Image (cartoon, helix red, strand yellow):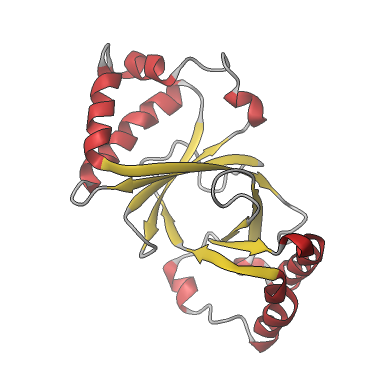
Amino acid sequence: TFRVFPKPEKLLEFEKAFAAHAQKYHTGDWKWRVYSIETGPDGGGFHVIEGPLSWEQYDSRGDLGAEHTADWAKNVAPLTVDRGSSSYVEFNADLSNVAMTDYSDKIIISHMYIKPGMVLQATELVRKLKKVWIAGNESVAVYNPIASGAPQITTVTRLKNGLKELSTGYRKPMAERFNEAHGEGAWNYYLLDYAKSIESRWSKMLFLRADLGSK
């Protein structure tokens, strides 16, 4: 995945050039799925997913050719600000309760940054959440970033029924659901373990921009 940020005054030009680039050069194995970042510190940017692919496929990817690179450098990059990020993430089928490619148009990405030496404990916290997700009919994909910054676990809540899933009353409060799944008082113990294992956490909401992605 990578995130790119257009110059505000060049947004329409950026979208046109970006879509043309994606639809000409990113097909087949290298197709792009593009989301607009609606909230959080990266709001106003675009989140681009290339794949899913195997590590072996990435070994042979290269730069997709001189024409591809020149098109990005000439037609897209000048319309962006000097900001961005990229990462590799692996899908964790054991912790997820939705198939990797069972996508939705509206999603919430949450980054949980793990304290040193607490990877196993943090993973166990997510495993407990999975039981709650299943009981509440939430679709959540879990990813492990690889060599892409501080150690973290990334969860992607796929809002299959749209933003109404965030409405008060759509589901019971998390604490209540967690206690139902793991026993009375379990939520309090979860919070104590969370404080011991997780350094920080932040989230963002994203909407699919099919018009900007690969066709």
Compared to residue 94, the image places residue 10 above or below, namely: below
Compared to residue 141, the image places residue 172 above or below, namely: above
| Horizontal relation, residue 129 to residue 10: left or right | left
Q: How far across and how far down the image is residue 6, in percent?
A: 69, 63
Give the residue drawn at x 49%, y 72%: 57
Compared to residue 11, the image places residue 134 above or below, namely: above
Q: How far across and how far down the image is residue 7, in percent?
A: 70, 64
Q: How far across and how far down the image is residue 161, in percent?
A: 65, 28
Give the residue drawn at x 73%, y 60%: 8
User: Farthest top residue?
Assistant: 184
Query: Which one is nearer the viewer's eye here, 36 or 134?
Result: 36
Give the residue drawn at x 60%, y 20%: 167
Report the quarter where the C terminus lies. Answer: bottom right
| Horizontal relation, residue 49 to residue 19: left or right | left
Residue 181, picture quadrant = top left
Q: How far across and how far down the image is residue 127, in percent?
A: 32, 35
User: Farthest left residue?
Assistant: 117
| Horizontal relation, residue 118 to residue 204: left or right | left
Residue 39, picture quadrant = top right
Compared to residue 7, the image places residue 99 above or below, namely: above
Query: Which one is nearer the viewer's eye here, 104 or 196?
Result: 196
